[in-house]
Amino acid sequence: MNIALRVVQGLLAIAFLMAGFQHGSQPLDKVANSIRWVRDVPPALVRVIGVSELLGGIGIVLPALTGVLPWLMPSAGAGLMLVMGSASFFHVSRREYSAVAMTGVLFALAAFVAYGRWVLVPV
């Protein structure tokens, strides 16, 4: 179980660090060319989402690598669940069902890590 959790944590870290970098630091005009919803929300919200994704991506793996503050891993998983749950509702409201599927998968993986690191294999 520990190996499965580590693999999922690594995949989530990659996904959220990439998304967070894009949403949090790239020029919004550039981001809006590849992500349609960016034009329809306030720029500050795009940046908050990006920073949340970056922090979640870091928090899901860094404590395991350093051995410092291991409670941050399940907390980061729970935070990413909140971000992806909100994203799912947003995409449903816009009838973007392929995006709902992706956010649903990421939500499930984050839930697996949160539960796994709190209950199954705490670090």
Image (tube, rainbow, N blue to C red):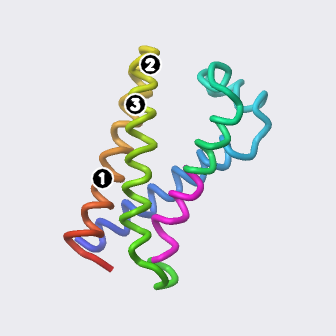
Q: Which mark identifies residue 96?
A: 2
Q: Nearer the viewer, residue 85 or 21?
A: 85
Q: State the residue position of label 1.
A: 111
Q: Nearer the viewer, residue 57 or 14?
A: 57
Which badge, 1 or 3, comes first in the chain's sequence?
3
Under tag 1, what secondary structure?
A: helix
Identify the magenta region.
Answer: 53-63
Under tag 3, what secondary structure?
A: helix
Badge 3: few (under 14), some or many (20 or more) residues near its Cα, within 10 Å?
many
Compared with residue 116, is residue 80 higher up or lower down, i.e. above or below? Answer: above
Which badge, 2 or 3, comes first in the chain's sequence?
3
Question: Which residue is depicted at the point 63% across and 50% down?
Answer: 51
Q: Main secondary structure of the magenta part?
A: helix
Residue 19 is covered by the magenta coloring: no
Q: Which mark identifies residue 88?
A: 3
Report x, y in % for residue 74.
36, 65
Badge 1: few (under 14), some or many (20 or more) residues near its Cα, within 10 Å?
some
Amino acid type indicated by mark 2: Glu
37 displayed left or right of 115: right
Amino acid type indicated by mark 3: Ser
Question: Which residue is depicted at the point 63% across and 24% down?
Answer: 41
Compared with residue 23, is residue 121 higher up or lower down, i.e. above or below? Answer: below
Under tag 2, what secondary structure?
A: loop
Kindly indicate the quadrant of the structure image that contains residue 47: top right
69 displayed left or right of 38: left
